[in-house]
Image (cartoon, rainbow, N blue to C red):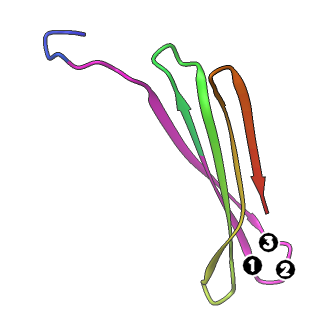
Amino acid sequence: ADRTKKILLGTTKISFVATAGSDVNTLNFQMLNNSYDPSNKLLESTSTTYTISAAGVPKITRVQISGSESGFLVNLDAK
């Protein structure tokens, strides 16, 4: 901590990827969220994929979560 008494607890980095969808006139939009501890060790990774129709309507098509808790690796992949 410095004189402002602020303590870094971690960092979250958010990014995205857009690709052509598997159906005609759709777009896959994937949000990536990575959380790190103060030493920059990856704690948790989350990916949410939305399929956006030609009318602009988004629908969640996949969620992936990976992280560790009390020494156990936890992975979730929901389609």
Return the residue at label 3: 21
At x 63%, y 90%, the residue is 55
User: Are discs 2 and 1 less than 8 Å apart at CB?
Assistant: yes
Using a 10 Å C-alpha cutoff, classify the residue at mark 3 as few (fewer than 14 neighbours), some (14 to 19) or many (20 or more): some
Could you say whether the residue bearing mark 2 is in a helix, strand or loop? loop
Q: Is residue 12 above or below residue 39?
A: below
Return the residue at label 2: 23
Q: Amino acid at mark 3?
A: Gly
Q: Is residue 72 above or below residue 5?
A: below
The label number, if any, that marks residue 65 in the structure image: none
User: Are discs 3 and 1 less than 8 Å apart at CB?
Assistant: yes
Q: Position of residue 14 (x, y in %)?
A: 53, 44
Using a 10 Å C-alpha cutoff, classify the residue at mark 1 as few (fewer than 14 neighbours), some (14 to 19) or many (20 or more): some
Q: Which quarter of the picture shows residue 30?
A: bottom right
Q: Which residues are magenta?
A: 6-32
Q: Quadrant of the C terminus?
A: bottom right
